[in-house]
Image (cartoon, rainbow, N blue to C red):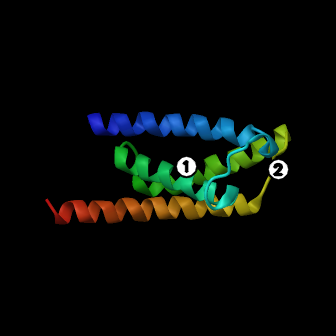
Amino acid sequence: MKKSLIALCIFFLIIIFFTIAALIPRNSIDFTPYGGDDFAHIYIFLMLSFLLCFSGLIYKRYIYFIFFSYGLFIEILQFVVGVGRSFSYLDISYNFIGIGLGLISYFLFSKIKKYYK
């Protein structure tokens, strides 16, 4: 239970950070992650889906829906706010890829963990 609570706290901190970062105009950010802004979507959604799976607080089958909805919400928010950011279908597809990779990583991690127990 303690591990899942820690994972959930990290998860919410990342959600808050990503939501704020998604609204900051792109030209005012000096840091560019390895692979560029597009791969940042993959990295972040990979971490979020892995941590949520690891926490065990939600059924794995709902994770795609939850994060797809969150990614769509962020893109719509960028469209509405319109401060140096814009709606992008490509970003949504990168989010989707990140979610899939996070789920695959979690299941591989689970199999390896069970194998070495």
Secondary element type, mark 2? loop
Tell me which residue sits at (20%, 61%) in the image.
Answer: 114
Tell me which residue sits at (83%, 37%) in the image.
Answer: 81
Pointer 2 or 1: first along the chain: 1
Residue 40 location in percent, x, y? 62, 54
Residue 1 location in percent, x, y? 26, 36
Tell me which residue sits at (69%, 51%) in the image.
Answer: 72
Image quadrant occupied by the C terminus: bottom left
Q: Quadrant of residue 88?
A: bottom right
| Label 2 neighbour load within 10 Å: few <14, some 14-19, many 20+ | some
Q: CA distance from mark 2 to mark 1?
A: 22 Å
- Which kind of residue does numbered mark 2 sit on? Ser
Q: Which residue is mark 1?
A: 66
User: Residue 108 bears which disc, if any?
Assistant: none
Q: Which residue is mark 2?
A: 86
Residue 92 location in percent, x, y? 68, 58
**Is 71 on the left or on the right of 83, as rendered?**
left
Secondary element type, mark 1? helix
- Which kind of residue does numbered mark 1 sit on? Ile
Pick the residue in front: 61 or 106. 106
Foreground label between 2 and 1:
2
